[in-house]
Amino acid sequence: QVQLAESGGDSVQAGGSLRISCAASGDTDSTYCLGWSRQSPGKEREGVAVIWSRGGSSDYADSVKGRFTISQDNAKKTLYLEMNSLKPEDTGMYYCAAGLNLLSCQMAIRFPTMLQNWGQGTQVTVSS
């Protein structure tokens, strides 16, 4: 099991930037990947970004490519999401999650709920 705790959510103006973090603990060596997803009221959870635990390659949803950057600090066991040029449609609860097998990581953007261990989320609100 991997325990995850998000932090750093805030309210920002459109066009602004924000970095959110996710601290991992527990059996972190068992993870294949870590990912960020988001959900706003009345909408399905949307995969945002994923980074592979070994090698560090990453993938993004089309809606955030070029604006968001996922990164990880293995020494600190912390995952980050740097968000730039924020838009009101980026508003939502942002969750980090761990993928414990290959398939869930390959599907993390299209089907984020396949990831196994989840944090409680951190709220990001972008106002116009």
Image (cartoon, rainbow, N blue to C red):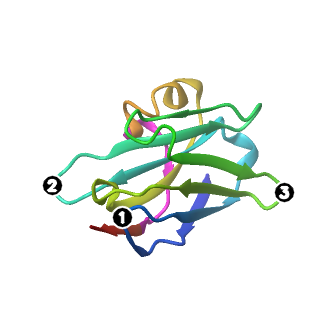
**How would you rate the neighbour count of disc 1 (Cα within 10 Å): few for under 14, some for 14-19, many for 20 or more?**
some
- Residues at marks 3 and 2, CA–CA distance in whole angstroms: 37 Å
Residues in magenta, as a range: 113-122
What crowding class fits label 2: few (fewer than 14 Cα within 10 Å), some (14-19), or many (20 or more)?
few
Above-or-below relation of 81 to 114: below
Q: Nearer the viewer, residue 62 or 33?
A: 62
Query: Residue 52, image x and y in percent?
Result: 66, 35
Are dots 3 and 2 in contact, CB under 8 Å?
Answer: no
- The nearer-to-camera label among 2 and 1 is 1
Left or right, residue 77 beside residue 20:
right
**Gap between marks 2 and 1 measured at Cα:** 22 Å
Query: Is 116 part of what is drawn in magenta?
Result: yes
| Residue at image mark 3 | 75
Give above or below for 108 relative to 64: above
- Residue pictured at 37% horizontal, 52% vertical: 38
Front residue of 60/114: it is 60
Q: Is residue 89 left or right of residue 63?
A: left
Q: Quadrant of residue 42?
A: bottom left
Q: Position of residue 123 (x, y in %)?
A: 39, 69
Residue 93 magenta-highlighted: no
Residue 42: mark = 2
Identify the mark nearer the N-term, 1 or 3.
1
- Check disc 1 and report the residue beneath it: 14
Residue 90, labelled with which disc? none
